Image (cartoon, grey):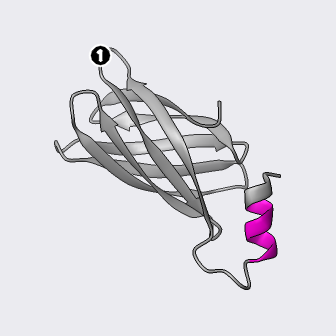
Amino acid sequence: MNKSLLACGVFLSLLSGCSMTLPVRGNVQGSDETFTGTATGYMDGGGDLTIVTNTGVKCTGNFVYVTHRNGEGVFKCDDGRSGPFEFVSTGTRGTGFGDLGGQRVMFTFGNM
């Protein structure tokens, strides 16, 4: 288990808002559109993300862990596109895919 997550778990009774933020990188399949950003997971099993495409579109989303390794969420972008995504996580890195306005999205996150 990641030391930061372990520390959060050990001191959860003393701390509120314990979290881990990781970098996100990905692309929209079938286009030249790429994105970067961050995802922050919280000890309550939820989290949020913010990404910005190379064309300047900002997207945000929320996610929840369905199991200790798998999660799901929804993207919502400033240009009106939105869609669901899923991911698999080891705690400090992972991969995911989703749909953004009818286009497939692939991404990685964490310490690669």
Left or right of 76? Residue 3 is: right
Which residue was labeled with disc 1?
Answer: 31
Q: Residue at x 27, y 36 (%)?
A: 101
Total residue callouts: 1
Q: Main secondary structure of the magenta part?
A: helix
Write down the region rendered in magenta: 5-11
Queried whether the magenta region covers residue 51, the answer comes back as no
Q: Nearer the viewer, residue 39 or 101?
A: 39
x, y percentage for residue 8? Answer: 73, 68
x, y percentage for residue 27? Answer: 40, 24
x, y percentage for residue 69? Answer: 71, 48
Queried whether the magenta region covers residue 6, the answer comes back as yes
User: Seen from this angle, which residue lies furthest bottom?
Assistant: 14
Q: Residue at x 57, y 74 (%)?
A: 17
Q: Nearer the viewer, residue 7 or 59?
A: 7
Does dot 1 land on a helix, a strand or a loop? loop
x, y percentage for residue 7? Answer: 78, 66
Is residue 27 placed above or below 93 in the rendered structure?
A: above
Is residue 93 placed above or below 10 in the rendered structure?
A: above
Left or right of 76? Residue 1 is: right
Q: Nearer the viewer, residue 73 or 50?
A: 50
Q: Residue at x 70, y 55 (%)?
A: 67
Is residue 26 placed above or below 86 in the rendered structure?
A: above
Left or right of 22? Residue 111 is: right
Q: Residue at x 52, y 40 (%)?
A: 23
Q: Quadrant of the C terminus?
A: top right
Q: Nearer the viewer, residue 79 or 112?
A: 112
Which amino acid lies under the numbered mark 1 shown in the image of this protein? Ser
Left or right of 53? Residue 62 is: right
Q: Residues within 10 Å of mark 1 (few under 14, many from 20)?
A: few
